[in-house]
Image (cartoon, rainbow, N blue to C red):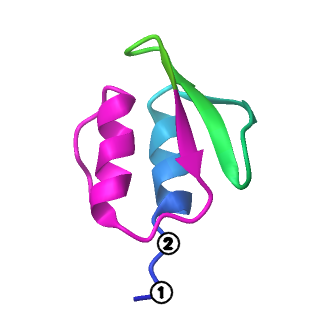
C-alpha cells in the first residue's frame, strides 16, 4: 500500500489546536497538544492507520483512520 496518513493526520492535529514545535530525530517532528499538555513525535511517513490513530490518542483526540 502506498498510503501515507501523515498529511491528513497533521491537518487534523492543526484543526484541533495542536501545534508543530520542532524537528525531531530523522524525519520526525515534535508536536504539542493543548488537550493533554504533552509533546509527541509525528513521523513524516505514516503507512499504518493504527500508528496514525495512536498519534491521535497521544494528542487526546478520537480515532479517525
Q: Position of residue 61 (x, y in %)?
A: 30, 32
Dot 1 crowding, Cα within 10 Å, few <14, some 14–19, many 20+: few
Query: Is residue 64 one of those drawn in magenta?
Result: yes
Residue indicated by mark 2: 4
Q: Quadrant of the C terminus?
A: bottom left
Quarter of the image containing the N terminus? Answer: bottom left
Q: Is residue 32 magenta?
A: no
Which residue is rendered at x = 65% and y = 48% of the image?
28
* Helix, strand or loop at mark 2: loop
Q: Is residue 45 left or right of residue 55?
A: right
Residue 53 placement (x, y as % from top left): 30, 49
Residue at far bottom of view? 1
What residue do we see at 55% from left, 45% from top? 42
User: Measuring 38% from the left and 16% from the top, which residue is drawn there?
Assistant: 35
Q: Is residue 44 above or below residue 40?
A: below
Q: Which residues are magenta?
A: 40-65
The residue carrying mark 1 is: 2
- Dot label at residue 28: none
10 relative position to 54: left or right: right
Residue 41, position in %: x, y? 55, 38
Sort mark 2 into few (<14), some (14-19) or many (20+) by Cα contacts within 10 Å: some
Amino acid at each position: 500500500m502506498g498510503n501515507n496518513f501523515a498529511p491528513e493526520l497533521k491537518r487534523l492535529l492543526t484543526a484541533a489546536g495542536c501545534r508543530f514545535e520542532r524537528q525531531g530525530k530523522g524525519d520526525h517532528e515534535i508536536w504539542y497538544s493543548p488537550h493533554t499538555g504533552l509533546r509527541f513525535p509525528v513521523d513524516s511517513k505514516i503507512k499504518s492507520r493504527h500508528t496514525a490513530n495512536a498519534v491521535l490518542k497521544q494528542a487526546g483526540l478520537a480515532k479517525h483512520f
